[in-house]
Amino acid sequence: MNRWFDGRRRGREDDGFASGFMTSDTHISEKTALESLREELPVVWEQIPDKGLFFGLLAAWLAIFQFLGNATFGYIQSPSLFLWMKGTYDAPGSDDAHGTLIPFVVLALFWWKRETLLALPKRPWWPALFGLGAAMILHVLGYAAQQSQVSVVALFGGIYALLALVWGWRFALASVFPFVLFVFCVPLTGIAE
């Protein structure tokens, strides 16, 4: 039995709570989730290879959708696909508000799978350029047809292709489950009307 329980049974003579504070030998030194994250994040960050390449390509990919993402100016007066998505999520009567939470869920699942993902061999996989090209063609078609939902699919398809391009097909295969949740970011309210 632990010391706290023994002290309590004997009439609280040495339970650590007599003065209102726990004594050092009864203090539980469990880390909070935030403390654990603060300690582990720099360690995990150091183990990720080719961060600069991935985030540079990601920034360029996201810039395309920021400045040339939305062709439907009748609803949102911005060329940004991200503002179009936010406007759709926040619209009255929209059933798509969960779309703002999905990226955080995906990041949390990537964090949860971090040990598995870090253990995988990582090297560039050039066939992923075909996936990136297909995502760009899909975006151009969605942009030309003024179907922003198609461009949202292209956005996330391109990010997935970038994962495969920089870190390889094994990493992309292991990332399918968290990444497939981005399908819930595609606003469907406008399609149903």
Image (cartoon, helix red, strand yellow):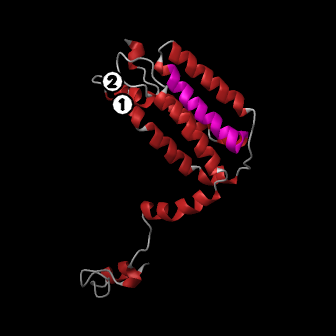
Is residue 15 shown above or below 138?
below
Which residue occupies the extreme bottom position in the image?
Answer: 13
Where residue 99 sits, quadrant-wise, is: top left
Residue at mark 1 to residue at mark 2: CA–CA distance: 7 Å
- The amino acid type found where label 2 is placed reads Ser
Q: Main secondary structure of the magenta part?
A: helix
Q: Are marks 1 and 2 in contact (CB under 8 Å)?
A: yes
Residue 112, percent from left and from top: 55, 50
The image shows residue 191 at horizontal and vertical percentages of 42, 14
* Residue underneath mark 1: 97
Instruction: Please state if 37 lies on the left or on the right of 135 as rendered.
Output: left
Label 2 neighbour load within 10 Å: few <14, some 14-19, many 20+: some
Identity, as a three-letter code, of the amino acid under mark 1: Ala
Instruction: Identify the image quadrant of the N terminus.
Output: bottom left
> Which residue occupies the foreground of this view, 64 or 83?
64
Q: What element does badge 1 sit on?
A: helix
| Residue 74 vs residue 46, the one in the foreground | 74
Residue 151 inside the magenta-drawn segment: yes
Q: Residue at x 53, y 30 (%)?
A: 64
Q: Total marks drawn?
A: 2
Q: Residues within 10 Å of mark 1 (few under 14, many from 20)?
A: many
Please, is residue 174 above or below residue 36 in the view?
above
Image point (69%, 44%), residue name:
167
Extreme residue in the front direction: 67
Q: Which residues are magenta?
A: 150-169
Please determine whether, in this image, residue 190 is positioned above or below residue 1. above
Residue at the spot of label 2: 94
Q: Quadrant of residue 27?
A: bottom left
